[in-house]
Every structure is written in structure tokens, then in C-alpha cells.
Image (cartoon, rainbow, N blue to C red):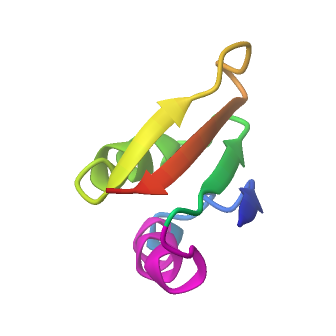
Amino acid sequence: MLASDVLYERRNVELLLELLPRVVAPGGAALVADPGRPHSGSFLAAAEGAWTVERLPGFERPFVAELRPR
């Protein structure tokens, strides 16, 4: 799954966290890209409970992160 610039509203954090398990197959991954919106940090922090989050090198701001189900 690929998502880009979807964290511009606080409500999108919870929506994306609820969506990910339904659209990412076991063994699959999601790539999330964000230009540095205010809610991107809270999304990554919340995702770390159920997902392995790896920020891809060379993408700090904007960032690109790969999320894999734990």
C-alpha cells in the first residue's frame, strides 16, 4: 500500500491506523510519505505498537517510512 500526504488532519491518524491492517497483507508493507505535517509524528508513534516502522534513509523531511505488520 502507498499513502502520501494523508496526515494533514488529526482525524486521519486514527483512520489510517484502522485502515492499514485491512489493506496490508501478511508479509506486506505500507509506504507512507509525508512532507512534515503536524500529525505525522503522532502517527508514527502510534503505529509502532502494531507495526515495525522504518524511516527510509535520505527522506527526513519529507519523510518516507515503511511499515510492516509485527
63, 51: nearer the viewer: 51
Q: Position of residue 23 (x, y in %)?
A: 59, 81
27, 38: nearer the viewer: 27
Residue drawn at x 40%, y 73% as measured from the top left: 14
Is 59 rendered above or below residue 12?
Answer: above
Among all residues in the image, which is located at the extreme top? 58
Q: Which residues are magenta?
A: 13-26
Among all residues in the image, which is located at the extreme bottom? 22
Q: In the rendered structure, does residue 18 fall within the stretch colored magenta?
A: yes
Residue drawn at x 71%, y 21% as measured from the top left: 59
Residue drawn at x 64%, y 18% as measured from the top left: 60
> Which of the 4 quarters of the picture holds residue 52?
top left
> Which of the 4 quarters of the picture holds residue 45?
top left
Is 39 rendered above or below residue 69?
Answer: above
Would residue 6 be found to the left or right of residue 38 on screen?
Answer: right
Quarter in which the N terminus is drawn: bottom right
13, 10: nearer the viewer: 13
Q: In the rendered structure, does residue 22 fall within the stretch colored magenta?
A: yes
Among all residues in the image, which is located at the extreme front? 27
Q: Position of residue 24 (x, y in %)?
A: 57, 73
Is 26 rendered above or below residue 35?
Answer: below
Would residue 21 be found to the left or right of residue 37 on screen?
Answer: left
Q: Position of residue 18 (x, y in %)?
A: 42, 80
Q: Main secondary structure of the magenta part?
A: helix
Q: How many marks?
A: 0
Residue drawn at x 75%, y 61% as measured from the top left: 2
Q: Position of residue 16 (x, y in %)?
A: 51, 72
